[in-house]
Every structure is written in structure tokens, then in C-alpha cells.
Amino acid sequence: MSNINVVSVTELRPVLEALDEYEWPVPFDSADGLFQRLGWERQRKKGGRTNFAVSKPFVAIGDLHGELSRIEFRVSDTYPEATAEVKASMLTKVEELRGVVTEVVGFGPTGAPWTVPGYVWDFADGRQIQLKAIDRLIELQYWSKRYADIERAERRQHVDPDKNLEP
């Protein structure tokens, strides 16, 4: 369990730098250029594979009214079961990755994700990075201002994301 792979500063830096260099909002059609620049493989309209040395290097992207709204990718190995040992290891690795993201973006976390352990970095222009420990893996989510604003509004209105379809 102690040998879980996580993304390094060297691997993550070009990704976050590339995303930061775009003038946001970014047209969804720009995703092909991003994948090509990072050496990632686009396998479908809304995702593909990263080149990270993790067990399931999946990446998903979001389209919000023609805007690239989110880029979500795994930054750790994925384990078949969410045992107590796996969850404890994930929390330890989230701390390690907090330092990686902080080093790359140049400032520390400004908050925490809403429903899972992790960290949030809020940029002055409203964009956001969320680093989340999700049961069996760790995921980094890079959100546009518009997408991050949706969650901010839901928090203000006390919308429970675990019960969002209940009357």
C-alpha cells in the first residue's frame, strides 16, 4: 500500500502551466490543442488518457455552453476496493499532492472541497483547482470560473449534492 503512485511536480507543472496560460473562458474546441500540447490521447468527445504513470490515467473534460468548463484527471493509482487502509493511504497522499499543487501554482489552498477530503485553490479571476480524495483514487479538477460559480451558488443556497434529486 505504501507504494501508491502519485503525480510528481515534474509531471504536474506543465499541465497547470498550460491551463494557466489560456485566456479564460476557453472555447471547448480548444481541448484538442490542449491534449496535443500535453501529449495526452483524446479518445472521445469529452475525455481520454493522460500520460501519467498511474494505473488508470483517465481525463474527463466538460462543455458548458461551448466553454471548456472543467478538466478532471486522476493523479494517483486507482485501487479496486475502498478499504480503510486504502482510504488512509489516499489521505496521506493528498497531503503530499497538496504540496505539489501549491509549489506549482505559487500559493496555498484557500479551502476544501464540499463533500470529500482534499483542498481547493481559488484564483483571483474565479477559476478553481480542487484536489479530491475520492474513495479509491485522488483526482485533480481544474474548473473554469463559470463552472466554479455553479458550486459556489449551490453552497450559498445550501444545496446538498448527495440529495440533489430529492423533493
Image: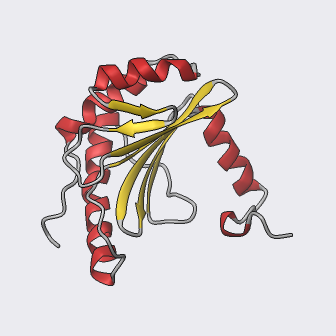
Q: Which residue is at 59% across, 22% downward? A: 25
Q: Quadrant of the N terminus?
A: bottom left
Position of 57 with respect to 20 (left or right) is left
Q: 96 above or below 14? A: below
- Residue at left 73%, top 53%? 154
Residue 162 coordinates in the image, percent (x, y): 66, 68
Provide residue 113's location: percent of width, then percent of height. Answer: 52, 57
Would residue 1 appear left or right of 78 to someone viewing this image? left
Please tell me whether residue 109 is drawn above or below residue 86 in the rendered image: above
Q: Quadrant of the C terminus?
A: bottom right
Residue at the extreme left: 3
> Which of 107/136 is in front?
136
Q: Residue at x 54, y 31 (%)?
A: 124
**From this viewpoint, is residue 26 visible?**
no
Task: Using the rendered view, name the quadrant where residue 149 is placed.
Answer: top right
Q: Nearer the viewer, residue 22 or 30?
A: 30
